[in-house]
DNA sequence: CCAAAACGTTAACAAAAGATAAGAAAAACA
DNA sequence: TGTTTTTCTTATCTTTTGTTAACGTTTTGG
């Protein structure tokens, strides 16, 4: 999609959290960049500081790290979702994971320096500060739910729940990635699926 | 400790995130309450909306939920740490977990209504908004690490790491709570401990 | 101070998951 | 199109975990 439409998507995303008039948008927009991330290209890499936060306006990305030579997938971001190696981005320390495009993707990014400028800005700082807070709070809740799932549910229960909620994940993502996401091996997920098939059949 | 000292603790906690002068503190302090939570008493309960966020100035609390009649412990908060059923607090929906005092505790609390007032305040709103953002970001990072641990590490690795970092948890908390926290049963943790003993001995 | 409850370990068995390898089907791509 | 890679399943074997129960110890609370 053309860059202006992409930027518009970013504005809409902000406006789901805080209202924003045209003047405010005029102040924010110059800090944004629109970029293309080709399939298999990395948005973040281990050992490097993640200098951008982004909004996926088209496509999807996968978060993973390499352990004992194996890729272990921890998360995904789809259209209209933010992406960043948050810990690295926020702490300014080298990250541990890759963020890689699953498909050719288009991303609206905001650099660390830019976001700090925006937070400190006279005119829009207050509003953006609130936006940042609400974003962080929402992701906090997502993580809280996910940790709860690990603590209180079996892998089978986690998978069943994932099917119920019918996330986009299921349609667009290879199952061995989902297995990692659920905290089990691909082989194990395959067995879980068979067990569930038998029950529901 | 006396209420004024407790409030002072809260101020110090805020100041680890944002600077705060006396006038700002004067504006914030009236929104705070100091309360005592006796051992085994609940700060939050399932089915109820969590209306307060708090800072533990003395004591410790445990987060747990009841599944199939069993208590499953997911988290703890100690001195100088925040506590809240964040999801319930932020979304204004009934929560799912208990937050219960492990010891007689003293807590400085801020109600949902109060914190919104503070965020909207002319004088200190901007600063508190940033405080709220930084808090949420920090907790986000904690959760990110924890989810990563579940996805990439075995229970044994998680326990070993917990010992290395030598968290307060280990000293003050019964091991079957720690087992839940790590995502395994108490019996399993006992076996893990024995395995590790043999190796390091 | 005593009885009851909570706690940690261990054992025995069942269930589930990890590791590895093999094979078929589907997708990627050249 | 045909070939290679990826993906998913299945099987086998080993390891780990869950479950239940028992036992001694410690802690708690009246």
Image (spheres, coloured by chain):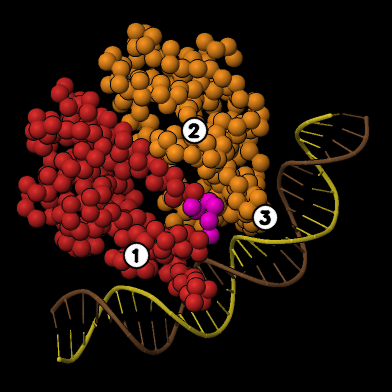
Chain colours: A red, B orange, C brown, D yellow
Within-10-Å neighbours for mark 1: few <14, some 14–19, many 20+: few
Read off the chain for label 2.
B
Mark-to-mark CA distance, 2 and 3: 33 Å
Dots 1 and 2 on the same chain: no
In the image, residue B129 sits, relative to residue B88, either above or below, namely above
Mark-to-mark CA distance, 3 and 1: 34 Å
Asked which quadrant contains residue D17, the reply is bottom right
Locate the N terminus of chain B and report the quarter of the image it occupies: top right
Main secondary-structure element of the magenta-colored stretch: helix
> Residue B123, percent across and down?
28, 14
Q: Is A86 placed left or right of A120 in the picture? A: right
> Residue B13, percent across and down?
43, 22
Q: Label 1 near label 3: C-beta < 8 Å? A: no
Q: Please report the bounds of the magenta region as a residue range.
A: A149-155
Mark-to-mark CA distance, 1 and 2: 33 Å
Name the residue at 66% across, 41% down. B174
Please identify, in this view, whether the residue under mark 2 or under mark 3 is nearer the observer.
Answer: 2
Magenta stretch: includes residue A150: yes
Q: Which residue is mark 3?
A: B187
C21 vs B176, nearest the viewer? B176
Name the residue at 26% across, 49% down. A81
Q: Label 3 near label 2: C-beta < 8 Å? A: no
Please identify, in this view, whether the residue under mark 3 or under mark 1 is nearer the observer.
Answer: 1
Q: Which residue is mark 1?
A: A170
> Residue B93, percent across and down?
44, 39
> Residue B3, percent across and down?
55, 12
In the image, residue B42 sits, relative to residue B70, either above or below, namely above
Read off the chain for label 3.
B
Read off the chain for label 1.
A
Any mark on residue B50, and which?
2
């Amino acid at each position: 999609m053309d860059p202006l439409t992409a930027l518009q998507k970013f504005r809409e995303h902000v406006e789901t959290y805080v209202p924003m008039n045209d003047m405010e948008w005029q102040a924010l927009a110059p800090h944004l960049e629109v970029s293309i991330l080709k399939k298999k290209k990395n948005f973040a890499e281990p050992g490097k500081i993640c200098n951008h936060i982004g909004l996926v306006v088209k496509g999807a990305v996968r978060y993973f790290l390499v352990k004992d030579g194996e890729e272990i997938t921890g998360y995904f971001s789809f259209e209209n979702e933010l992406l960043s190696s948050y810990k690295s981005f926020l702490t300014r320390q080298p990250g541990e994971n890759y963020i890689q495009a699953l498909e050719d993707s288009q991303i609206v990014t905001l650099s660390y320096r830019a976001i700090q400028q925006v937070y400190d800005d006279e005119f829009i700082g207050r509003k953006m500060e609130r936006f940042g807070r609400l974003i962080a709070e929402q992701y906090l809740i997502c993580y809280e739910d996910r940790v709860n799932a690990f603590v209180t549910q079996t892998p089978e229960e986690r998978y069943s729940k994932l099917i119920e909620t019918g996330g986009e994940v299921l349609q667009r993502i290879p199952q061995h990635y989902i297995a990692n996401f659920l905290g089990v091996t691909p082989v194990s997920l395959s067995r879980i699926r068979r067990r569930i098939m038998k029950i529901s059949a």
